[in-house]
C-alpha cells in the first residue's frame, strides 16, 4: 500500500508519480463526491500522453481517450440503476482490452470486475489537500 498527500496544485506531478505504482491497467477510484476523482483521472490521462479534452462521463458512462501507447477509458457509473446497464456499453470488452480503464463508482458493477485491479482511494483532508492510497 502506498500513500501520497498532495495539493490540487501538485496534481500533475502526483499523476506522474502514481502511474508507475499501478500494477494493473484496470484502476478503481474510490472517494466521496467532490473528492477529486475526476481531477486525478484528468491528470493521469494527460500523463499517459493524451491531448484530448478530458471530462466526466457521468451521462455517457464512458469516455475514450488516445494515449501515447494505448487507449484510455474513463467510466463513471454513478448514475447506473442496475449493474447490467454497463453491458449496454460493452463494459466487459473494455475491461479485457489491455487498455487503461479508470472506473469511478465501481461498486455499482463490482460483480463484473476482473479478479485483479488496482484501487486508488481518495481522502479529502481539507479544501486544498488530498491523500490517496494505492492498493494493487
Image (cartoon, rainbow, N blue to C red):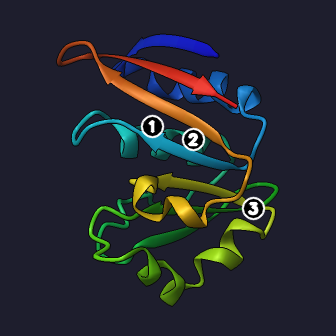
Separation of disc 2 and disc 3 at Cα?
14 Å
Instruction: Residue at the far front: name it.
Output: 111
Separation of disc 3 and disc 1 at Cα?
18 Å
Q: Which residue in the structure is indicated by mark 3?
A: 99
* Element carrying mark 2: helix
Which callout, 3 or 1, points at the residue further toward the start of the chain? 1
Q: Which residue in the structure is indicated by mark 1?
A: 40
Q: Residue at x 61, y 46 (%)?
A: 27
Q: Residue at x 76, y 28 (%)?
A: 20
Say which of marks 2 and 3 sits in front.
Answer: 3
**Residue 58 at what x, y percent from top left?**
31, 66
Q: Which residue in the structure is indicated by mark 2?
A: 44
Could you classify mark 2 by the number of other residues whose Cα lies within 10 Å: few (under 14), some (14-19), or many (20 or more)?
Answer: many
Image quadrant for the N terminus? top right
**Residue 5 at what x, y percent from top left?**
44, 10
Q: Are marks 3 and 1 in contact (CB under 8 Å)?
A: no
Q: Are marks 1 and 2 in contact (CB under 8 Å)?
A: yes
Q: Is residue 90 above or below residue 22?
A: below
Q: Which of the 4 image quarters holds residue 10?
A: top left
Could you classify mark 1 by the number of other residues whose Cα lies within 10 Å: few (under 14), some (14-19), or many (20 or more)?
Answer: many
* Element carrying mark 3: loop
Q: With 61 as the anchor, is 69 left or right in this view?
A: right
Q: Is residue 70 above or below residue 10?
A: below
Q: Residue at x 65, y 21 (%)?
A: 17
Amino acid at each position: 500500500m502506498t500513500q501520497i498527500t498532495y495539493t490540487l496544485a501538485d496534481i500533475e506531478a502526483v499523476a506522474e508519480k502514481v502511474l508507475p505504482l499501478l500494477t494493473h491497467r484496470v484502476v478503481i477510484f474510490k472517494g466521496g463526491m467532490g473528492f477529486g476523482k475526476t481531477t486525478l483521472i484528468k491528470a493521469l490521462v494527460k500523463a499517459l500522453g493524451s491531448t484530448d479534452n478530458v471530462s466526466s462521463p457521468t451521462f455517457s458512462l464512458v469516455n475514450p481517450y488516445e494515449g501515447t501507447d494505448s487507449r484510455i477509458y474513463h467510466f463513471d457509473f454513478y448514475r447506473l440503476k442496475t449493474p447490467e446497464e454497463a453491458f449496454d456499453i460493452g463494459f466487459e470488452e473494455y475491461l479485457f482490452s489491455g487498455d487503461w480503464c479508470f472506473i469511478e463508482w465501481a461498486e455499482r458493477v463490482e460483480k463484473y470486475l476482473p479478479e485483479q485491479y488496482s484501487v486508488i482511494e481518495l481522502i479529502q483532508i481539507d479544501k486544498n489537500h488530498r491523500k490517496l492510497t494505492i492498493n494493487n
